[in-house]
Image (cartoon, rainbow, N blue to C red):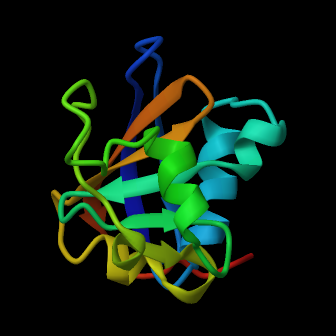
Amino acid sequence: MYHFELVNLRTGETGEMAILDDMTIEDFCRNLRCEMGLPYTLGSREHLIIDKQNRIFMQDVEVIAEHVDMLWEGADDPNDPDKEGAIYDETSYFPEDKHTLQDLFPQVGADVLYGQDYDRIGCKLIAITEDEEEE
């Protein structure tokens, strides 16, 4: 089991959750959304996760160039000095249904940022324990 500490950076609300370590990132996002009481809206469909290596995990199986521009509003354009975002391209994006939590959280202390609408949830892996038997 992976044990997480969660913090909504917008509201300050905190939470914890424990889930199976072989769960897909897509399923992790569903659990996180429920645990933190985030709404299930169009914005939840357009959520993303960014890790410390600037890898971006999204729900879509294939990420295309329009997603980069839509999410970062041209931050990847070096000719526009008003854009201060990091530079991302299509190779930074990964489908979350093809990766497990083991890919995202390689060790205790690893953390990521989950974004949905205006909410940003910091997710930190605080412990790894043996899987608990289902009753």
In the current view of this chain or complex, which residue is farthest to the front? 79
In the current view of this chain or complex, which residue is farthest to the right? 41
Question: Which quadrant is the C terminus positioned in?
Answer: bottom right
In the current view of this chain or complex, which residue is farthest to the top? 11
Query: Which residue is pictured at 20% across the width and 48% down the height?
Result: 78
Question: Which quadrant is the N terminus positioned in?
Answer: bottom left
The spot of residue 132 in percent (x, y) is 53, 77
Report whether 88 appears left or right of 22: left
Is 40 placed above or below 118 here?
Answer: below
Of residues 84 and 57, the one drawn nearer to the viewer in this rendering: 84
Report whether 67 appears left or right of 8: right
**Picture quadrant where residue 80 is located:** top left
Query: Which residue is pictured at 19% across the width and 30% down the height?
Result: 81
The spot of residue 46 in percent (x, y) is 68, 49
The spot of residue 26 in percent (x, y) is 63, 69
Query: Which residue is pictured at 48% across the width and 56% down the height?
Result: 68
Is 92 placed above or below 52 here?
Answer: below
Query: Which residue is pictured at 56% across the width and 23% down the height?
Result: 118
The spot of residue 127 in percent (x, y) is 26, 61
**Picture quadrant where residue 79 is located:** top left
Number of marks drawn = 0
